[in-house]
Image: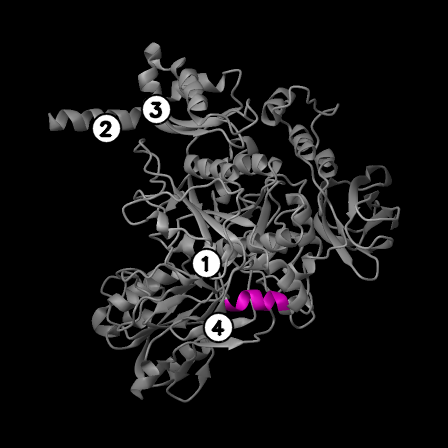
Amino acid sequence: MVNTGRFVILVLAYRFLSYVVYMGSPSSGGGGDPEAVRAGHVQMLSSVVSGGEQGSAAAAVTHSYHHAFEGFAAALTESEAAALAGHERVVSVFKDRALQLHTTRSWDFLEVQSGLRSGRLGRRARASGDVIVGVIDTGVWPESPSFDDAGMPAVPPRWRGVCMEGPDFNKTSCNRKLIGARYYGVQPDTSSPNAAGSGSPRDTVGHGTHTASTAGGAVVSGAGYYGLAAGDARGGAPGSRVAVYRACSMGGCASSAVLKAMDDAVGDGVDVVSISIGMGSAFQSDFLADPIALGALHAHARGVLVACSGGNDGPGPYTVVNSAPWIITVAASSIDRSFQSNVVLGNGNVVKGVAINLSNQSLSGGKYPLVFGAEAAARYAPVAEASNCYPGSLDAEKVRGKIVVCVGTDPTVSRRVKKLVAEGSGARGLVLVDDAEKDVPFVAGGFAFSQVGTDAGAQILEYINATKNPTAVILPTEDVRDFKPAPVVASFSARGPGMAESVLKPDLMAPGVSILAATIPSADTEDVPPGKKPSAYAIKSGTSMACPHVAGAAAFVKSAHPGWTPSMIRSALMTTATTTNNLGKPVASSNGAAANGHDMGAGEVSPLRALSPGLVFDTTAHDYLRFLCYYGYKEGIVRKVSGDAEFSCPAGAPSPDLAAAAVNYPSISVPRLRRGGKAAVTVTRTAINVGAENATYAAAVEAPPGVTVRVKPDRLVFNKRWTTARYEVSFEVADGAGVSKGYAHGAVTWSDGAHSVRTPFAVNVV
């Protein structure tokens, strides 16, 4: 009996896969009876299920979407999925893929960089508790002080969400700060990822708690990480409400669960959604088979702003993900704080290194023998592997009790693996010589660790070779504030162009390196130093950390301007972003070169400046539908997406050049600019005056060498607020101009003397 049952389960797991069936805008306009909608989905599915049995069809449906868009997720055979794809009501059918999970000082740094006095403006926005931020991630640790609701008013009556209970999560876990919590359970298809693990919104990973507290956490005094990064922890909009949607676990996120969470968030009444999740850049698909892009498109149509991480596959080009034009795509940057862990050699020389280690080596008063990994190779282990701290490559007898020096010439061996190899071999510490990721301090817990650059590494190796008994000590980490230059684009931060080169991506950059925020107090983590209790706060890096900064900034602006649309808020954040560092020089990329639009988008987000942008660019749902037409989707498909039976695509063939002009975006990307006077490309934009009653804005152009950029008209005159003005920007490269092929970057900046409205552009000379 048991064996037979297992056989059946294995056969089912082999036969069925989880698919998402997307049907466009809801036929009922959204918010219809969920049971009736689900029944309709079951009926549709039963029409393709062998035998037409409604019972088996009902069992196959795992999620039903009906708030912002319509569709369902179900366990299907390949032939059933193909049959549904041909149904007249279906837009697309795609496999339920696995998506991956992609502050004391950071908010203060952004305020300093704004150049504004924060008192009056900050109080104006933080006083409002009506803005609701939805965070789709790994859940929440509700006991964290970052979700304390002391002093907060009653929950806004428009909130329609719930606080789902579980074995370790009660309704009382929610409050006036953490107003909602949902979770999405195990998928019945064994081939798809576990969406949320246990049946509870409780975070068991730490990622979701970290991102939620970064976006909207309360002010917590005395936060820190074992004495490092001490200060007041807070979110970008500490007066806002937070709702969490647990759609992910340590292993990743089921795209069907993420899509369901987005649908629920819109139905619950959130204003801003933060998603630090995405597929790898090598696996990007078209927009109508991308669950995050689909959910965000319909969320925007319902007035909900969606911010997403751009991914951690940088620094190469074409690595940015979540790049649909209706998403705010966020890159990651450093802040003006560095975590230094220096190495003191036996000859007294001090070598500067970076890491977050809480070792006590300096307290012992002595130094430890120092050995290069290549000189401590295990028997039969290649020297190259030992020099890289490759697993199994070190001779424990040769490294026990010593500090090992390893290099990073093999990128397949991560810093964490090298640390575990050295620690497992009995070493007392590890010095890693590697320039890669040196801008992102590695968290080593209580193990002595320091990463140095190749020049400093050469100095250490020279000392080892010239000394009979080389010794060293790795000092515990010290945090250095007012570090310069900052910000710098993080090395891991994904770069543009995006999937659609007619839209400049990423949009913005925000702090994503060594960000302190709330976490789960897990006693199992290897980062907890011996004899210490788990920390309630953690230091993490990634575009996952940058995204909630922008979501929090959006909530901050929304609280001051509740009537603004998502695209107006995005515009305010982009056109007021800063492009200079704390030395007053242009922001640099991780390789030291000046950052461009494909590295940082419009620049580093500046929430205070965004409160008063002067002009904004409002992008409508119709703009995005026209974009889909120009991108190449057929009119019938776009009509289903829109839910408007009267919609028609513009005349003419699909064109990326036209797509660049179709969306009223606060940046410009021209994917093809040919040489010659007749090959000029013209893009139109429409600005709305949200500043002074009577204002005149003059245009200034930063044009790359050899590219002629003209703005017509070059002055915009407004007689009152909320009036619009249209202008054109033309780009041209003359024959023989000597411009090399590839992307060139610049900007058009409108100024009335009080506001500076900067719109970056990128043109690809072919």
Q: How many marks?
A: 4
Residue 683 is at least partly visible in this image: yes
Instruction: Give the mark toward the camera: 2 or 3.
Output: 3
Name the colour scheme.
one colour
At horizontal 42% and vertical 76% (from top left) the residue drawn is: 477
Amino acid at pointer 1: Asp
Q: Earlier in the sequence, mark 1 or mark 4?
A: 1
Magenta-span inclusion, residue 110: yes
Residue 702 is at least partly visible in this image: no
Instruction: Give the mark toward the camera: 3 or 1.
Output: 1
Task: Identify the residue under disc 3.
Answer: 60
What is the number of the mark on residue 10?
Answer: 2
Question: Magenta part of the protein: which range?
Answer: 104-111
Q: Is residue 485 above or below residue 703?
A: below
> Alpha carbon of mark 3 to alpha carbon of mark 1: how far?
41 Å
Q: Quadrant of residue 609?
A: bottom right
Task: Identify the residue under disc 4.
Answer: 231
Quarter of the image containing the N terminus?
top left
> Alpha carbon of mark 4 to alpha carbon of mark 3: how far?
51 Å
Q: Is residue 678 above or below residue 128?
A: above
Marks 4 and 3 in Cβ contact (< 8 Å): no
Amino acid at pointer 2: Leu
Residue 617 x, y percent position in the rendering: 73, 45
Marks 1 and 4 in Cβ contact (< 8 Å): no
Instruction: Give the mark toward the camera: 4 or 3.
Output: 4
Q: Quadrant of residue 649?
A: top right
Task: Identify the residue under disc 1.
Answer: 149
Q: Earlier in the sequence, mark 2 or mark 3?
A: 2
Residue 67 x, y percent position in the rendering: 51, 31
Q: Earlier in the sequence, mark 3 or mark 1?
A: 3
Q: Mark 3, residues whose alpha carbon is within 10 Å: few (<14), some, or many (≥20)?
A: many
